[in-house]
């Protein structure tokens, strides 16, 4: 039997951030116990969830 484990690979994305902000962002993330990548993913998931809630609410109003 072939194992069909969920693929958890994420694609690398290019984001342009100036060096000073990137360095301070690392400190801010470390203070929260997160890596920069993890913090960015948390932010994206929150934004997507809010967007989906808004779409659902607008669809039920129509």
Image (cartoon, grey):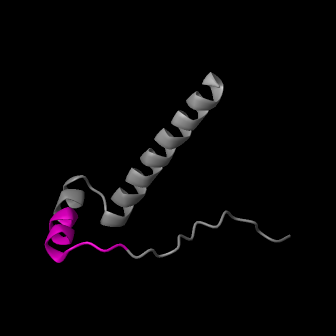
- Residue 9 coordinates in the image, percent (x, y): 56, 71
Nearest to the observer: residue 5 or residue 18: 18
Magenta region's main secondary structure?
Answer: helix
For residue 21, what is the image quadrant? bottom left
Q: What's the residue at 67%, 63% (across, down)?
A: 6
In the image, residue 16 above or below residue 62:
below
Q: What's the residue at 43%, 54% (across, down)?
A: 44
- Residue 42 coordinates in the image, percent (x, y): 40, 52
In the image, residue 46 above or below residue 15:
above
Is 7 one of the magenta-colored residues? no
Q: Is residue 30 left or right of residue 48?
A: left
Nearest to the observer: residue 19 or residue 55: 55
Q: Which region shows up in magenta?
A: 15-26
Q: Is residue 29 left or right of residue 39?
A: left
Considering every residue shown, the one lying at the far front of the view is 62
Image quarter (top left, top right, bottom left or bottom right) of the C terminus: top right
For residue 40, what is the image quadrant? bottom left
- Residue 15 coordinates in the image, percent (x, y): 35, 72
Considering every residue shown, the one lying at the far right of the view is 1
- Residue 53 coordinates in the image, percent (x, y): 53, 35
In the image, residue 54 above or below residue 20:
above
Is 23 one of the magenta-colored residues? yes
In the image, residue 44 above or below residue 59:
below
Considering every residue shown, the one lying at the far top of the view is 61
Count the marks: 0
């Amino acid at each position: 039997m072939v194992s069909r484990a969920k693929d958890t690979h994420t694609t690398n994305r290019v984001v342009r951030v100036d060096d000073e902000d990137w360095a301070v962002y690392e400190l801010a993330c470390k203070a929260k116990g997160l890596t920069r990548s993890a913090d960015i993913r948390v932010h994206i998931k929150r934004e997507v969830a809010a967007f989906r809630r808004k779409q659902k609410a607008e669809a039920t109003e129509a």
